[in-house]
Image (spheres, rainbow, N blue to C red):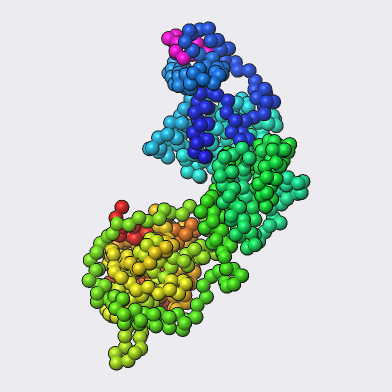
Amino acid sequence: MRRYLLGLAVMLLAAGIAFRFGALTPPPEAANAQEPSTVAPASREEVADPFTIPESAEVAVLVNFVKALRTVRPELGPALDEFEEKAPAAIRKACERIIDLEKSATSEARRFAQRELLPFRMSDLAESDKVTVEARKQIAADAIQILKDSERSASDVELATRLAITFEEFAPADESLALYEALGELFVRNTNEAIARRGEYLTGAARRLGIVGHRFELVGTTVDGTEFDIASWKGKVVLVDFWATWCGHCLDELPNLKRNYREFHDKGFEIVGISVDDDREALQTFLKKQRLPWTTLHDEDTGSEHQAAIQYGIAAYPTSFLIDRDGRVLATDLRGRKLSRKLDELCGSGNNQRPGYPVFNVSEVIDKLTNAGSRLYKSGKTRGDVELRQQLDRKSIELKLPEPNDELLTDRELYRRACNSVFIVCSLYKVAESNDWQTSLATAFAVTSDGVLTTSCHVFDNEDEADAVVVMDVHRKVYPVKELLAVHKRADTCLFRIDATDLQPLPFADDAPPGTRVRVLGHPGDSFYFLSSGLLANYERDHEGTTWLNTTADFGQGSSGGPVLDEFGNVVGQVSRTYTLYAGGTTRGRPRRVAGPMPGDKREREVKDEPEDIADPQMVFKSCVPVKTLRSLVKP
């Protein structure tokens, strides 16, 4: 719906047709506040055909032509169709000719033409498949300058609003936020109250674009006259929903909201709807008929210009915000199944019966892996290292990876989500002349929903030979490893398959720069599902040209193959190994990196000749596989 409305706004703005967009149209008193232009008055008698550009080279004639078209308000039917088809092109061409003829940067006619061309330029960028950063920033800078030099009238703030809304459709959030802030600053202190309110909307839209991860403030009055403050709901998960009875998409979502409210309300989920209806009686009739069980706010005096809609610059309906138990915004505009899945993560269906997080006993885990693994081994359903190593030459496989997540996650939510994707890898070694088994543990995580996982290559490629390799998920279900699918030996990573469906894969980030906040989830020292945090410290390339990622997040033996995640829960790397840094033995001695132990490690150590005096350890490097290397195993 948002894309449709924004596209319509651009079209109508370019054509000069009045357009009511939620709370964006200035009231009549604001429109009347516009001062008369000093450009010569328009006259439609100068041309027989209102869409034919005058042949005259006089700037004033062209200005009058444009202003004449701007006054046309054709009725519905063929006249309107013709106007929408011909007027925008005529206005644009005339304004371009004005700029060609009028070279003075201070000319009022030139400024008039530049202002008229703004929506066309914005529309060009919105419709282009190849929008450059430079082009976007230039149109934003020009818009700010043109409106800064304007009279700051009602028509100016209306133009600013519609330009910003259009920019939001195709530009990154940070650029749109900056434009909203700059334009809002131009109008928010205007002496005309209605114009200043439009400036508040622009500032509010910037607030909305940057709200994820921040606290959400909301006060108002319910339909029955009760004062409301969302702060009173701290400790609950809250959906704030801006809607209206005339909004078809809002009504389409109501059944889903009702289902989620029934399922999760007793587990701490609340909904507060902010109605932007102008007709209070129609709203009350609707609420009585629908019997909505949640809180509804409405201001009979402001209607479509509800203070909360201005505060957050709401440009389309429905618009929603999902608030966590600490009062911070987790995501915006979650609907349908996406909302249901998120609420299941936050509220769950069994919080009253057991903790919403895994709690493991080491002995129980080892016994479970050993017993289940030995049964699978005896039934011939497992693969050992000898068989699996015959597949180490497989370089890549065609897979469809999930799209990266763009919702900021709290650490608790990230942990809950990632636990469902992370597995314990167990290599089983049969003790000769006995029924005992020895184990070696590592970490893996799901890449696709149909059974493709990834872990470190050294789990399979080492000097020992496991008789069977199995994995166990967070629900303690054990699966045998069936085959290796793709391997990058030097980079210490591989993809493998288990017989499983309906897994919850972790999405891959496109990339991550140093300084990115990261989380690592693994099983160091038999401490299962251990979450640590830190920063992506740097990237470095070894003597064979392989790129590695270092992180300050902690991990240890047993974490190999675990995911390194950004704050959105996207994979930015994979745990590989550690290096300990020792100080040099002499004044001029260079510090030495010594690799930590790894079963059957066949890669040469960075330090071939260990120093005689290897005392004074200084720090430990946490070396990981970058996400770009993981992606290289997957065919596009």
Residue 520 image point, x, y percent: 45, 66
Q: Position of residue 363 (x, y in %)?
A: 46, 84
Left or right of residue 418: residue 386: left
The correct choice, above or below, for 119 with respect to 539 in the image is above
Q: Is there any visible trace of residue 216 in the rendered image? A: no
Q: Is residue 147 above or below residue 292?
A: above
The quadrant where residue 424 appears: bottom left
Res. 3 in view: yes
Q: Nearer the viewer, residue 190 or 361?
A: 361
Q: Is residue 86 above or below residue 377?
A: above
Q: Residue at x 49, y 63 (%)?
A: 417
- Image height check: is 4 above or below 457? above
Q: Residue at x 37, y 56 (%)?
A: 401
Asked where in the image residue 431 lies, by quadrant, the reply is bottom left
Front-most of residues 583 and 600: 600
Residue nearest the observer in this picture, 544 or 530: 530
Residue 396: say if magenta.
Answer: no
Please give left or right for residue 397 compared with residue 327 in the image.
left
- Start-end of magenta stretch: 51-64
The residue furthest bottom is 433
User: Residue 54 magenta-drawn?
Assistant: yes
Residue drawn at 47 percent across, 62 percent down: 518
Asked where in the image residue 244 lies, by quadrant, the reply is top right
In this picture, residue 586 sits left or right of residue 265: left
> Residue at point 30% right, 70% down?
482
